[in-house]
Amino acid sequence: MIGVLVFPNFQLLDAAGPISVFDIATRYAGQASSIKVLAVRPGPVRSTSGVEMLARGVKPSGAITTLIVAGGEGVREAAKCATTLALVRAMVKRGIRVASVCSGAFILAEAGVLDGRRATTHWQRTSQFLGSYPKVKLEPDRIFVRDGNIWSSAGITAGIDLALAMAAEDFGDEVAQKTARQLVLYNRRSGGQSQFSSLLELKAPAGRFAPLLAWAREHLDAPLTVEDMAEQAGMSSRHFTRAFIAETGTTPSKAVERLRIEVARLRVQSSSEAIERVAQTTGFRDPERMRRAFIRAFGQPPQSLRRAARASYG
């Protein structure tokens, strides 16, 4: 049985997305769907949109095989609830698969079950999460992360990606692929959530580091060390690094790699320029280094992205 834990002011899609995935997947697998919405107080639970879900009371049950914890504006209060935290701890202790969607990771972290584990959350919550839970190995540039029996996903729709991966584990890749097609989605979305993150916002004139990022984008063939960027920003290296992480949720070096990846991707997909040349002029230097970066970001090497782009044009 899939249990979806909600609370007042939860994000509706955090719950509805995974519910839809498992509903469709179980039907394709020829099984009866068994999904329950859970809450500390049974009855209608109001989401941030005003739409309500009818929930059962939370009770540790041997029937639950997966617990999915939603996120939303009410997550701060939910993370203070002893009953909620006890449920999460009990599920993890029993080896039950437990997952969070978006800011639901705060509930898992508050329960202590993410200490020493890898996890992710919505990019807007990265700085807050890092400050509150330093024992968690946060990976802010991931759509979802699995560490043992605990899964976590990035913002809102990433809960669907997470649920599709779970469906593949439960019912096989074919069922997961059929489910994704039914939902008109990619079965495995390429790329990390940084393509939607504050790094993009910082390209706008109002962004604090917008001039720096624009400068970096024009000098990708240079080393672009932290010291280089700090000097350009007029800050000490230590102050610059702290300020940059606080605003963007990522390190300067990862931000530079993302800029390099995005520029390289555009050139790989839109031209016939040699891969080696693209790697050289975007600062990767070594084509193998660029290939590894592409696989981390998109799940595919540059050549595969080029072939897919040509196929779509043709």
Image (cartoon, rainbow, N blue to C red):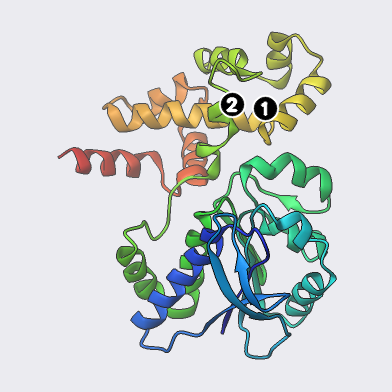
The N terminus - image quarter: bottom right
225 left or right of 168? right
Q: Nearer the viewer, residue 243 or 4?
A: 4
Mark 2 falls on what kind of element? Answer: helix
303 left or right of 17? left
Query: Can residue 19 be seen here?
Result: yes
Residue at left offset 51%, top offset 25%: 285
Mark 2 and mark 1: Cα distance apart in space = 6 Å
Residue type at numbered disc 1: Pro
Q: Please say if the residues under marks 2 and 1 sit with CB atoms less than 8 Å apart.
A: yes
The C terminus - image quarter: top left
Q: Using the image, determine if residue 223 lies above or below residue 133.
A: above
Q: Nearer the viewer, residue 300 or 312?
A: 312
Badge 1: few (under 14), some or many (20 or more) residues near its Cα, within 10 Å? many
Residue type at numbered disc 2: Val
Residue 75 lies, in percent from the top left, at: 71, 57
Residue at left offset 71%, top offset 80%: 58
Quarter location, residue 111: bottom right
Residue 187 lies, in percent from the top left, at: 39, 61
Residue at left offset 50%, top offset 85%: 34
Disc assigned to residue 256: 2
Mark 1 falls on what kind of element? Answer: helix
Residue 27 lies, in percent from the top left, at: 36, 82
Residue at left offset 56%, top offset 12%: 215
271 left or right of 112? left
Residue 11 lies, in percent from the top left, at: 58, 57
Q: Using the image, determine if residue 300 lies above or below residue 172.
A: above
10 left or right of 77? left
